[in-house]
Amino acid sequence: MKVLRSSRAMSAWAEERRLEGRRLALVPTMGALHAGHVALIRRARRVADCVMVSIYVNPTQFCAGEDFEKYPRVEHEDVVLCKQEGVDVVFAPRNLYAADASTRVEETVLSRDRCGVSRPGHFTGVATVVAKLLNICRPHVAVFGLKDFQQCQVIQRMVRDLDFGVRLVFVPTVRERDGLAMSSRNRYLSEEERRLAPNFYRILCDGVRKGMGEKIIARELEKVGFQVDYVTHSCGRLCAAVFLGSTRLIDNVPLKKEAEGD
Ligand code: PAF
């Protein structure tokens, strides 16, 4: 398995595979890979001949005061995992932006509510880096996790609006045995916070099952120690973001049972 650092080398690798007639899938990540990412990689393998994983902690999607500096960077472990999963190439650039970069991709509707309120500019950072990764890697398919539901919506809209010509596959959230959604940020949780964290998913599921309103669900979350950012219904899902100490957690559950999505 190759680890490529430059956009040019990555594009050349992808172009060669395309000329050989291979179907390429890209799994964009910020590293600190966990079982959720493994599910994306395995799904990518099912729909393509070659799997590319990008590992890049994208500075433009972090807002001022967020955890960009302390975001976990464990590239060696990530590369070992990718090798074990039969990934064909890891794209791990040191930097993706020219010093005088002055162009951004901004989605102006779906990115505005929910996380867009408390993280202004976040989705512009995401859309811009995903656009760059799609242009560099030229995949036939790109695979994302539904835990970041709003991110999936924004990327889907961007791909449609800007005619990227890539098929998007969205993979259901992978959870710990106690229900907590897998996330690279879970490693920030103290022992006590980790013990409380599964209540997030439990309360959202209860909320859906009992048809509770958003305000009541928010109150239930606060009762067990979460500071609620938002609880809202959107596109057939109950979506929420909470803080546990200084760690921000997001999750969402479908209002109706759903089939594996793409
Ligand atoms: O979901 C993520 O890990 C990131 O937002 C992504 C899509 C890799 C863009 O940096």
Image (spheres, grey):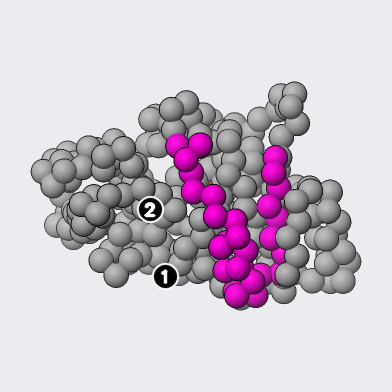
Q: Which mark is residue 187?
A: 2
What SS does tag 1 mark? loop
Residue 204 image point, x, y percent: 23, 53
Residue that mark 1 sits on: 259
Q: How many marks?
A: 2
Q: CA distance from mark 2 to mark 1?
A: 30 Å
Quick check: can you spot residue 120? no
Residue sitting nearer the eye, 175 or 196? 196
Q: Earlier in the sequence, mark 2 or mark 1?
A: 2
Q: Is residue 151 left or right of residue 49?
A: left
Q: Tell me what residue is drawn at x 36 percent, y 48 percent.
A: 188
Identity, as a three-letter code, of the amino acid under mark 2: Arg
Q: Is residue 13 above or below residue 158?
A: below
Q: Which mark is residue 75?
A: none
Q: Tell me what residue is drawn at x 56 percent, y 63 percent.
A: 77
Is 49 a magenta residue?
Answer: no
Identity, as a three-letter code, of the amino acid under mark 1: Ala
Q: Is residue 88 left or right of residue 155?
A: right
Is 86 a magenta residue?
Answer: yes
Q: Is residue 28 above or below residue 248?
A: below
Which quarter of the rendered picture does the N terminus lie within?
bottom right
Q: Tell me what residue is drawn at x 83 percent, y 60 percent.
A: 13
The residue segment tinted magenta is: 67-95
Residue sitting nearer the eye, 57 or 163? 57
- In the image, is the residue at mark 2 within 8 Å of ligand 1 by its beta carbon? no
Residue 39 image point, x, y percent: 50, 69
| Residue 40 placement: quadrant | bottom right
Residue 155 image point, x, y percent: 57, 46
Q: Mark 2 Cα within 10 Å, few/some/many (few <14, many 20+)? A: some
Residue 102 image point, x, y percent: 71, 24
